[in-house]
Structure formats: C-alpha cells, structure tokens
C-alpha cells in the first residue's frame, strides 16, 4: 500500500485517493428524516376489508386486492408488501386461511381474536358492579353480631 497526500487538502491520507482525517471530519452527513406516512398499514387495511365482508368461506385474495385498490392503495406497486402482510396476519392468528397456501386462496377472520376483542368491553361493563359489591363486603364483615345475654 502506498501512502500519498490528500487530493483535497494536501495533507497526509491513509491510502491513495482517500481524504485525510481533517476532510472526513468536515464532511459530516446530515440525516434528513422522511415524514412518517399517515394512514393505516397494509395489514390493517386487509383486516378491515375481511371484517367488513359477510362471506361465509372468507374473502379471496383477488377480492381483497380489489378492496385495497378501491380504498386508494396501489396494489400493483407493492405486491410484495401485500404478500408479506397476508403471511404475517396468518402467522399472528388474526386471519385464518380457508383455502390455498401462502399468500393465495381465501381468508377470514379468526373467531378467537374476535371474541378477545369483545371480552374487554363486556368485562368493563361488569366490573363496576363487582367493585360496588366488593366495597360493601368489608363493611358487613367489620360489624360483628351482638349477643344479648339474658
């Protein structure tokens, strides 16, 4: 390896055609952050479309792609993203694949996830009654029965 002077500032560079430490220190890259995309992700759009469907055997991939396109999502531009969204939703258990394998066939909502979404709302309604009953129980226990001796 041959050492030479920096082509930009005339100082010593480590290897030919590499700038010296002074030039590298001055040349700091400024990172510009991209604005975050506003809106639902592909997976959320798919779940929304499947949940809105009343099909008994689920919604086909072609019908889901049409629903995404009608919602303003460019399906042709991001085919790979749509495929991975289908696969990940099935892996998570949000969707159940009724026909086909991978990112093809028909998909419907998983009944277990639907019931989980409904349970917290029902539990929230029942909990005030339980809380009121629990608040009254210590009062009843704190007052012992009085015996009357004759």
Image (cartoon, helix red, strand yellow):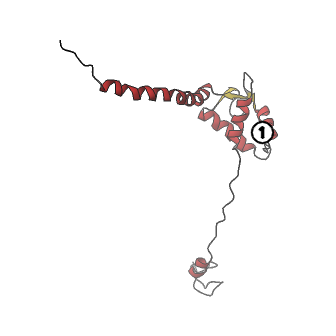
* Quadrant where the C terminus is found in the figure: top left
Give residue 11's quadrant in the image.
bottom right
Vertical placement of residue 68 versus 126, above or below: below
Residue under the point 62% across and 25% down: 111
Q: Residue 34: image x %, image y %?
A: 69, 59
Q: Residue 27: image x %, image y %?
A: 63, 76
- Left or right of 103 in this view: 126: left
Q: Residue 129: image x %, image y %?
A: 48, 26
User: Could you say which is closer to the camera, residue 72 or residue 23?
Assistant: 72
> Please, which residue is most extreme toward the bottom here?
10
Give residue 134's quadrant in the image.
top left
- Left or right of 89 in this view: 149: left
Residue under the point 66% across and 65% down: 32
Residue under the point 40% across and 26% down: 136
Q: Secondary structure at mark 1?
A: helix
Q: Residue 109: image x %, image y %?
A: 66, 28
- Left or right of 57 in this view: 134: left
> Please, which residue is most extreme toward the front here?
150
> Please, which residue is most extreme toward the top here?
150
User: Could you say which is closer to the camera, residue 146 or residue 127?
Assistant: 146
User: Could you say which is closer to the camera, residue 40 or residue 25?
Assistant: 40
Residue at numbered disc 1? 68
Give residue 132's quadrant in the image.
top left
Viewer can see residue 55: yes
Would you call the spot at circle 1 few (<14 residues within 10 Å), some (14-19), or many (20 or more)? some
């Amino acid at each position: 390896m041959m050492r030479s002077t920096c082509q930009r500032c005339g100082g010593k560079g480590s290897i030919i055609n590499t700038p010296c430490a002074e030039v590298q220190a001055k040349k700091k890259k400024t990172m510009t952050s991209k604005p975050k995309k506003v809106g639902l992700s592909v997976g959320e759009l798919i779940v929304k479309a499947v949940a809105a469907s009343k099909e008994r055997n689920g919604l086909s991939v072609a019908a889901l792609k049409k629903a995404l396109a009608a919602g303003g999502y460019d399906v042709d531009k991001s085919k790979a993203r749509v495929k991975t969204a289908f696969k990940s939703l099935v892996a998570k258990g949000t969707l159940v694949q009724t026909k086909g394998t991978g990112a093809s066939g028909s998909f419907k909502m998983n009944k277990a996830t639907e019931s989980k979404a409904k349970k917290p709302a029902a539990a929230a309604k029942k909990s005030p009654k339980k809380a009121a009953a629990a608040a009254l129980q210590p009062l009843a226990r704190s007052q012992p029965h009085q015996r009357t001796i004759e």
